[in-house]
């Protein structure tokens, strides 16, 4: 199948498929005489595996490691367990960070309980004050980190 067909069948954007190829997550496909990529069932299965891992918020490095084990079925899966345990730890840390972010946002929301002109808005005033103080040298910067990539 051509890349457009794989894209439709998998629900994956063509650029994402090409990106996964460049990253080594998908093997380079054969090409036609007209230089079109031709994918087989193995590509579709591997793409489905990669997409599922991404839906679990795994990094490309984590997926690469899992694929190495998947490609070596005789290997011991202890490292796969360790990888997943580490990923669970990252997720738990992010959940804690997100809960802290939620508390900060709720506290910020309490700064403006009445509908007023925006020049009187406690939220905007607090955000502006926090922005000014965070631009000072040695200012403590508190924010929630994104994914563990």
Image (cartoon, rainbow, N blue to C red):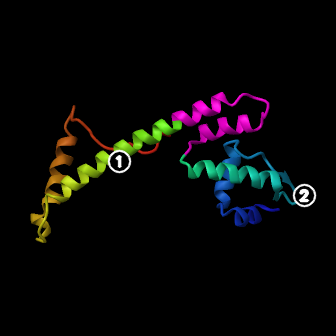
Residue 117 in picture, x, y percent from top left: 11, 71
Q: Pointer 1: residues within 10 angstroms few (<14), some, or many (20+)?
A: some
- Taking the spot 71% from the left edge, 47% from the top edge, the residue there is 21
Judge by depth and name the residue closer to the eye, 60 or 103. Answer: 103
Looking at the image, residue 29 lies above or below residue 117: above
Q: Which residues are magenta?
A: 58-86
What is the secondary structure assignment of the residue under circle 2? loop
Residue 82 in picture, x, y percent from top left: 58, 30
Residue projecting furthest to the right: 33
Does residue 102 appear left or right of residue 145 in this picture? left
Q: Quadrant of the N terminus?
A: bottom right
Residue 37 in picture, x, y percent from top left: 81, 56
Looking at the image, residue 38 lies above or below residue 79: below
Q: CA distance from mark 2 to mark 1?
A: 51 Å
- Give the overall secondary structure of the magenta segment: helix
- Taking the spot 71% from the left edge, 52% from the top edge, the residue there is 47
First reached walking from the N terminus: tag 2 or tag 1: 2
Which quadrant holds residue 79?
Answer: top right
- Taking the spot 21% from the left edge, 35% from the top edge, the residue there is 139
What is the secondary structure assignment of the residue under circle 1? helix
Does residue 116 appear left or right of residue 141 in this picture? left
Looking at the image, residue 39 lies above or below residue 82: below
Q: Which residue is mark 2?
A: 33
Which quadrant holds residue 36?
Answer: bottom right
Judge by depth and name the residue closer to the eye, 35 or 142. Answer: 142
Q: Which residue is mark 1?
A: 98
- Taking the spot 79% from the left edge, 30% from the top edge, the residue there is 74
């Amino acid at each position: 199948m051509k890349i457009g067909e794989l894209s439709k069948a998998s629900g994956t954007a063509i650029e994402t498929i090409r990106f996964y190829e460049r990253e080594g997550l998908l093997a380079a496909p054969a090409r036609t005489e007209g230089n079109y990529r031709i994918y087989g069932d193995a590509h579709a299965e591997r793409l489905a595996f990669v997409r599922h891992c991404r839906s679990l918020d795994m990094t490309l490095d984590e997926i690469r490691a899992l694929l190495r084990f998947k490609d070596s079925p005789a290997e011991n899966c202890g490292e796969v367990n360790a990888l997943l345990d580490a990923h669970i730890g990252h997720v738990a840390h992010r959940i804690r960070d997100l809960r802290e972010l939620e508390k900060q946002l709720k506290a910020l929301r309490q700064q403006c309980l009445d509908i007023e002109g925006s020049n009187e808005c406690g939220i905007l005033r607090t955000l502006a004050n926090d922005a000014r103080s965070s631009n000072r040298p040695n200012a403590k910067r508190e924010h929630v980190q994104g994914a563990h990539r």
